[in-house]
Amino acid sequence: MNVGRLFLGSPRETTLAHVWGAQSEVTRTWEELHDNVAGLCAALRELGVGPGERILVLSSSRVEVIESILAAFSMGTTAMPVSPLTGRTMLQAIVGKMKPTCCIFEEVPDPDVLRALDELSCKLISLNDPVAIPHAHAYRPLIEAGGRSLVLPSFEDQHPALIIHSSGSTGTPKVVEMTHGALVRYFEYHNFVWSQYADASDSLAATSPMVTGLPLHHLAGISTCLQGILNRRGSYLMTYFLPHAYLKLIERTRCASMLLVPSLYRSLLNDPYLREMDRSALRCCILGGEACPKELIRRIEAAFGVPAVVVYSTTECLSGIGHSRREIFAQNIKPGSCGRQLFGELSLRDVDGSVREDFGELWVRNATVHACYLDHEMNDARLRGGWFRTGDLFARDEDGDFFHRGRVDDMFICNGKNIYPLEMELLLMQHPSVEAVCAAPVSFPHKGPVPAVLVVSSQPLTSREVQDHFRRNGPPHLVPQFVMFADGLPLLGPGKADRRQAATLLQSGFESRRVTASG
């Protein structure tokens, strides 16, 4: 088995491009992509990089990143894309633990990180030429000298192909390893999910390009881009997400479906170009990666004139939840619903593992579930008899629609009531002046945890106004006892709030207020 054969095993009519700003573009035809991957494979072998070893890729979203990933798939090494914005300490830890044999980078790594790579005798390849490090190789001359014959040997199902450092919801990266067999199954079902967005009269899966606004160190960004190549669709990458440039790219390519996290949609809604943009080719806006308030769904639908579809999956596996083609094109989707069971098995469970019909942690069992963590203890904790425990709470209504309700480990108890931070956030996001919010408990002496919120507002707000909004629109136990305002939320990745950091900020602000009040 070789997952690279899905994309490079036979010629196809497709292009791959990355875009800086609104116009500057680097494009590859399929033939150029194939030849560059072949050249890189030959060059890596010449440098002594072989099957089973790991290639660290530190870059923004460029065509060379996809070439590096496909080269790793093809020759049996493991691609390890990591954000170039990763902090020095975290990057040093990744290098020390993963021990890459090769590092392909865009900007010269931090000196301490570079020193750690040198201690491993790691081969260095710079995407920029001239090379700023004497002992590094330049990417372009390297692949041009490498030859154009691409060999795609077979590997065992369990042979590693891709490592993703998923930030999850904790701030501590989960190291997820995708094998050749797991990726082949993943793309088989990923293709089925994407096929729901193609109607019979106009097969979008074969005509409309894929525009990837999500970064390539996330599986969603990689898989969306590769989905285009797999289905002979043009694939466009944004090197870094810029709202104005993204809207122009969607317009220019006549992309039929957008996939972004809700916070990036908010940035689009604030961009002036949206008012003049040609949206005639657009069929739907897909939202994933975080919970989406109903008010934001309504704003997106009003602004773009197409359905806004909420989706849910995980880095570890596909969830099996989704929307059918009939529902999407009939615009018969409940606001906030992540869909119904599309494939596999789904179960809602209590903390003791007993089955619930209406609310609980989502467990999934399908062909994409596998022991994916490098940490074997995590595999033992999250996998039970072929079931994957997602750690996410869902409600399921009488029609079988699933609604995301937050993380299992976010829930806390105050005065005997279970409080789910996501429930607080969705309620407060209904306020027209609230741009973003993160809820978390703060510790109150002699009382225990009480609800608090960190709020980003577009207009001046007071704590009393925030609390009054809760009193008017929700149950009494959700009223925050401490409100803190900020210019932005701490983030783990694109659109994903760092709840632990937010909780730390709230606790610090709460204690400062108590000290000031007591003084």
Image (cartoon, grey):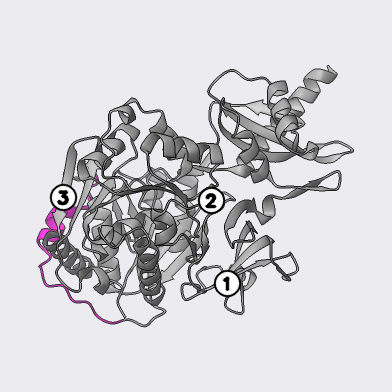
Q: Position of residue 42 (x, y in %)?
A: 17, 69
Q: Residues within 10 Å of mark 3 (few under 14, many from 20)?
A: some
Q: Is residue 270 visible?
A: yes
Q: Quadrant of the C terminus?
A: top right
- Asked which secondary structure carries label 1, the reply is helix
* Nearer-N-terminus badge (3/2): 3
Which quadrant would the N terminus be assigned to in this image?
bottom left
| Badge 2 density bin: few <14, some 14–19, many ≥20, Cα 10 Å | some
- Decide which of tag 3 and tag 1 comes sooner along the chain: 3
Position of residue 5 in the picture relative to residue 446 (left or right):
left
Q: Residues within 10 Å of mark 1 (few under 14, many from 20)?
A: few
Work out whether residue 56 can be spotted.
no
Q: Tell me the SS state at disc 3.
A: strand
Tell me the residue at 29%/43% (across/down).
Answer: 239
Pointer 3 with pointer 1, Cβ within 8 A: no
Q: Nearer the viewer, mark 1 or mark 2?
A: 2
Q: Is 434 drawn above or below residue 154 in the view shown?
A: above
Give residue 197's position: percent from left, percent from top.
Answer: 35, 58
Closest to the observer, 215 or 274 = 274
Picture residue at 46% right of the left edge, 72% below the top: 368
In 3D space, how far apart are the residues under numbered discs 3 and 1 (Cα atoms)? 41 Å
- Left or right: residue 385 versus residue 253 is right
Nearer to me, 78 or 90: 78
Return the residue at label 2: 334
Question: For mark 1, what is the residue?
Answer: 376
Residue 27 shows which numbered tag? 3
State if disc 2 and disc 1 touch (CB < 8 Å): no
Amino acid on which the number 1 mark rests in the picture: His
Counting from the top left corner in percent of width and height, residue 230 is at 26, 65
Magenta residues?
132-154
